[in-house]
């Protein structure tokens, strides 16, 4: 019982820090290249921990002309052109395509609401050569032109001093306890590497990172390290060193002395068979200090012969049944021989 309670506390902490969506009841804002974005096509909303934006407003805010946004009703496909970059996506699908090649996956699939397409902003913004952050003080998504990255108005290669972003191949790793996890194809820029955090020592800040080619790197999380999480929230190493955990996928950039300059958390995929699904409600306090009820769903999944308890505070879009083969997007955590995980999204195979 104590281990289950401890795992619940861990899952709640991760849900609130690594993967949580917009603060409850707060109005989400977006600042694009220094200008507030006006939502004329619809109101942003949160689904499965991801903030969904009206696509047309986002594209126009990024500089795409209305005449360069096309909708194919027969295939439910949107095509947007800016400079020499053409981005396409399909409602109900996570995949984003850039100039005909898959660029990356959305956190949740694009969806149509009242005739308008909504989706998470990050992948679209990055496809057009921008970086995405979050300012918790103003509850604002911040989009800026990426430094040293590809420009939508250019050829897709980086400006002087940088190089174009590349997509890594998907890679499978095993945790210390033998749980098999997959890091999906991930976009990396100049000087970056993608991998799985196999171990982390909060006392020294040592991050043991396993890479797709089978090699291992030991890097150090320092006070100046910039950490960015799936929800766009950013912290410094000084703020977050004591709370960072192993069991996550990351894109990292290191300084010459082995210290981490930047570390961006990305989701892992874990596949297994559902053993049990339970739901519990708890008294909690929301981001505005108001009393609320928090509902936690636990999905117990047999992965690599071991039972992993994945927890989420968000409503599931699909309800798995015992015996279903599922793929979980999230992270895993091993402590004192007990394996738990945070569930960001889930699909039935």
Image (tube, rainbow, N blue to C red):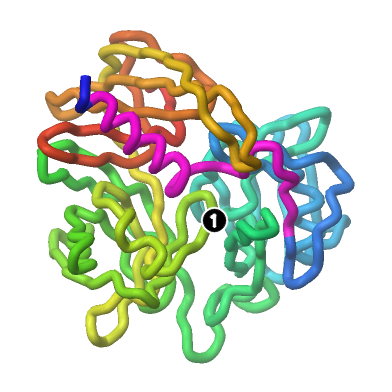
Q: Quadrant for residue 139, please give it.
A: bottom right
Q: In which quarter of the image is the N terminus?
A: top left
Vertical order, 287 against 283 (above or below): below
Residue 196 x %, y % = 25, 54
In this figure, which residue is indicated by the disc labeled 1?
A: 232
Vertical order, 126 against 57 (above or below): below
Query: In front here: 137 or 333?
Result: 137
Magenta residues (range): 4-30
Q: Quadrant of the C terminus?
A: top left
Q: Does the magenta stretch include residue 18?
A: yes
Q: How crowded is mark 1: few (under 14 residues within 10 Å), some or many (20 or more)?
A: many
**Residue at left 57%, top 73%?**
156
**Residue at left 58%, top 62%?**
133
Q: Is residue 166 visible?
A: no
Q: Is residue 12 magenta?
A: yes
Vertical order, 269 against 28 (above or below): above
Q: Extreme bottom residue here? A: 160
Residue 210 x %, y % = 19, 59
**Residue at left 67%, top 33%?**
111
Q: Is residue 292 visible?
A: yes
Query: In front here: 287 or 275?
Result: 287
**Residue at left 39%, top 37%?**
329
- Circle 1 SS class: loop
Residue 253 x %, y % = 35, 74
Residue 337 x %, y % = 11, 35
Query: In front here: 143 or 100?
Result: 143
């Amino acid at each position: 019982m104590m281990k289950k309670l401890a795992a619940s506390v861990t899952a709640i902490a991760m849900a609130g820090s690594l993967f949580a969506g917009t603060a409850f009841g707060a109005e989400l804002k977006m600042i694009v290249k220094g200008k507030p974005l006006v939502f004329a096509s619809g109101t942003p909303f949160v689904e499965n921990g991801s903030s969904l934006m009206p696509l047309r407003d986002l594209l126009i805010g990024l500089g795409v002309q209305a005449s360069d946004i096309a909708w194919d009703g027969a295939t439910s496909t949107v095509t947007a052109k800016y400079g020499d970059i053409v981005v396409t996506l399909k409602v109900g699908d996570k995949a984003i395509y850039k100039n005909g090649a898959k660029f990356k996956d959305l956190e949740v699939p694009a969806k149509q609401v009242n005739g308008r397409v909504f989706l998470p902003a990050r992948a679209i913004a990055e496809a057009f050569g921008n970086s995405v952050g979050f300012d918790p003080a103003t509850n604002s998504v911040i989009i800026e032109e990426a430094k040293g990255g590809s420009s939508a108005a250019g050829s897709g290669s980086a400006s002087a001093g940088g190089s174009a972003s590349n997509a890594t191949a998907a890679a499978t790793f095993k945790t210390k306890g033998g749980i098999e996890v997959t890091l999906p194809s991930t976009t990396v820029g100049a000087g970056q590497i993608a991998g799985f955090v196999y171990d982390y020592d909060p006392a020294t800040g040592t991050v043991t990172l396993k890479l797709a080619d089978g090699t291992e790197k030991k890097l150090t999380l320092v006070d100046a390290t910039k950490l960015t999480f799936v929800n766009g929230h950013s912290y410094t190493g000084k703020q977050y060193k004591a709370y960072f955990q192993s069991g996550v996928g990351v894109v990292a950039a290191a300084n010459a002395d082995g210290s981490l300059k930047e570390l961006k958390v990305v989701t892992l995929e874990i596949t297994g068979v559902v053993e049990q699904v339970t739901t519990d409600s708890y008294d909690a306090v929301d981001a505005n200090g108001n009393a609320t009820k928090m509902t936690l769903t636990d999905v117990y999944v047999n992965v690599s012969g071991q039972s992993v308890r994945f927890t989420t505070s968000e409503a599931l879009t699909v309800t798995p049944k015992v015996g279903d083969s599922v793929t979980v997007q999230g992270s895993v955590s091993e402590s004192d021989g007990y394996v738990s995980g945070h569930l960001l999204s889930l699909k039935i195979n």
